[in-house]
Image (tube, rainbow, N blue to C red):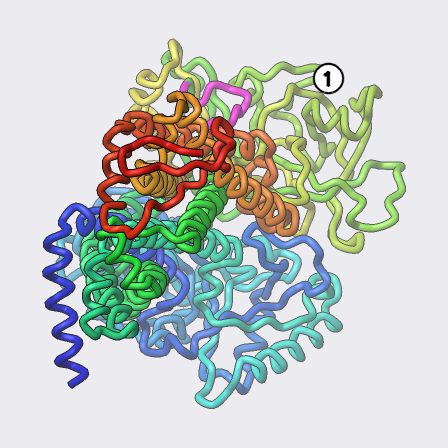
Amino acid sequence: MIIETFLQDLRIGLRVLIKEKSFCLLAVFVLALGIAAVTTQFSVVNGVVLRGFSFPTADRLVSIRFIDATATQPNFFGAPPNQILAYDFQELAAQQKLFEAVAGYTNQATVNLTYNGNPRRYTGAYVTESFLSMLGVKPVLGRDFTAADNTPGAEKVALISHRLWQRDFAGDASVVGAVVRLNGRPATIIGVTPPGFGFPLNEEIWIPIFNEYPPRPRHERGLPGGSPSVMGLLRRGATIEQATSEVTSFANRLAQEFPDTNKQFDTGHIEPLIRTFTPPNIQQLLFAMLGLCVAVLLLACANVMNMQFARATLRAKELAVRSSLGATRGRLIRQMLTESLLLAGIGAAGGVALAYWATDFLLATVRNQQTPIPAHISFEIDGLVLGFVVGATMLSSVLSGVLPAWMASRANPVEVLKEGGRGNTSRAVSFVTRGLVVTQIFLTCIILIASLLQVQSILKQQRIDYGYDTHAYMSARMGLMDGDYPNSDSRRLFYNRLLRELRASAELEHVALTNRLRMAFTITGPAAIEIEGREYKEDRDRPNVNVESVSPGYFDTLGLKLLAGRDFTEEDDDSKLPVAIVNAGFAKALFGSDNPVGRRFRTYGANGRNSGAWRTIVGVVSDVRMIGPFNNPGVESYGFYVPLYSSAFGPARGQVGPQFSTILVKPRGAGSGGAAAFTNNLRRAVNRVDPNLPLYFMGTPAENLDAFLATNRVIVSMFSVFGLVAMALASVGLYGVMSFSVNQRAQEFGVRMALGADHGRIIRMVLSQSAAQLALGLLLGLGSAAAIAIIFRTGISQQLFDTNPADPLTFAAVGLLLTLVSFVAVIFPARRATRVDPMTALRAEEKENENDPAPQPFIMSDLPFAPLACRVTRDGTSQP
């Protein structure tokens, strides 16, 4: 019986919707937009945060860290500082009892591989022997690593990805057992991983970590492999809380035994591994975007609800007749809700189809970047997403249909039929529709502010002034591996030969080397420093500044002006006199008007341990941006430079001279096209010094920075779409409500005009109604956005680059924009109100009064131009 009734409601609903094509198409389109937006973004959140890994053991994989629980400043990803040194890992792996296995790994590492005389650079990972087995992954060809492979001095071996095997080895099965040159040493390929495997982050080669980088003294934690990331596979039945307690006991003991390196990292931290790959700042951004999409869906529902109110008014006679024939109020509500469900269902189908296209396009876009998203992430419309869509559809149908249905069913059928089917707009309906407009403006205001702040942030990243022409140079990255360059002397010899080779070229005007990555930021990172002779009460009182290692001629290459002192020379050596050159910002902030040349400072290690050597300032150079296009909390904007071959951070960093460096050249007659033309010449010049050394990240600094920010351009595009859709929905909603209001008051406007009201007064009446709604919506929206920006300022600031979350110009721009959009949306219905023919309105009033037993009074006391109460009689005259 229930099913039959429901099917009957569906048939009736379909007939009604087919009859009302314009309403149906518009409502479906609006709902489809909202459902498509929220479905697409939820598929992103699901792929990055919720779905997790597809490995068989994914539910028991955790990340293991020793953290500094007392730290007040999070790291770049919004997490507390952490470390596990190589020796810490080995003790933990041997003595722990709550994990089936633990594995150490480093990701996104450079691996130089030469095969058949062709040197190539790949992104690889250095891992322990249990890495693949913990994930439940087995090679499709060959074998996995063993403990023997992961010992210093063992024969070097490597696993390669299925993609690399197909692309660079033509899928030849004989690659297993092939000997290649890997990081300067012979190595055997022992296996191929399954298709699609690229864990942790799109790596293509996996190498035993302690074979490549044997554990060294604890103070050399900055070396590759010296401080690996650690993951564990929990034993069945073990909990994260138990594991945290066990790891904390290890961290406490090691902090006491090795205070120089471990004192501050005395707390264990265990979390699901997927969270490690989606740090807090990424999660905050994704959920903020999902929240905006939900707001867009709510806007769509508000629009459809307003359309439903207008539609219910037009159907008033039909509903009254059905009620007179015995239909109960519940039956009428159920019928209208069924129609709303049909609309939402059709909208969901269209929204999901649009979401399929959007997710495919988005996934293809982020996969084709120079730095693609991790291989385990995929944006798919899977079961969880479809379940979310069903929930969104039901929510949409209820939100957009239940209130109009309930209020339409309250109408008195006798009064409706007596009015001849003209429909009746009660004050309650008018109040709700106007409230919905206020809600739309409120939501749109918040969406636009969030979108504009994010767009502004990313545009500022794109438009950073680095202090030099990023199109006028060519840069390329290279890595000197221990197999070919086992010590500082060998690296220094190579760099000197390379600089001589490049400077001998008549095509190059300037040549220099730096440790800056993609000319965006230095990999040695910021450093806390102390000025000789100054007292610091606490460690945090010491400034944390940027530092860069550069070769002589670097400042001339970039066109930086030497303001005092001298440039570096080939003779500068830490073994003779550690020196540094500071920028103008450093000199002004730390020395004021005093000349800093000749003053000394040093990098400061935790609690005074492992501090660097005292450096003498030999020069001051003009400012240039030293840090890339992102926030670096707690780090000053200024910094200093050290010679390329120096040990900038003392023995804590272990090496003298960088293992990785960037070549920076300025061609003669430089320009974007001219710089790009030097790619092959630059590669040949390097190969004349070392034929096995591949170059990567080649291009102008502008091209490298553009590739670095590719993901941010996707984000800004999404935020722009959110803002545009929200603004369109709000304007359509306001237009619809005002059109409906004008249509309902057409007779009133005609009477007013017959009694002397001019067009301007009618337009002002309509505009004043919308102005009140706009003002209230803006007040709520701007006020709420400002409150959110103030309360959550710290968290929001981490998501925005160089942008004030409570930027008054942004708030003012949103208010002005919504005012203009609202005016455009309202002016057309307002002008239509002035075109009402007064005589037509009066005849309509007379026709409706023909069936009345007596003339009905029309009270005009609310009209400022007609203060007297009067009666409109059948012959069209008025009597006081």
Image height of 276 relative to 843, above or below: below
Q: From the top left corner, tell me how far across and down residue 849 is, in percent.
A: 27, 45
**Residue 463 colored in magenta in the image:** yes
Read off the magenta span.
Answer: 460-471
**Residue 440 colored in magenta in the image:** no
For the view shown, which residue lies furthest in the bottom direction? Answer: 237
Image height of 214 relative to 518, above or below: below
Near-viewer residue (368 or 501): 368
Is residue 692 visible in the rendered structure shown here? Answer: no
| Left/right of residue 487 with respect to residue 265 in the rendered view | left
| Left/right of residue 487 with respect to residue 327 in the rendered view | right
**Residue plotted at (62% across, 47% down):** 787
Q: From the top left corner, tell me how far across and down residue 75 is, in percent.
A: 60, 53
**Residue plotted at (47% across, 37% down):** 869
Q: Secondary structure at mark 1?
A: strand
In the rendered image, which quarter contains the N terminus? bottom left
Which residue lies under the disc numbered 1? 565
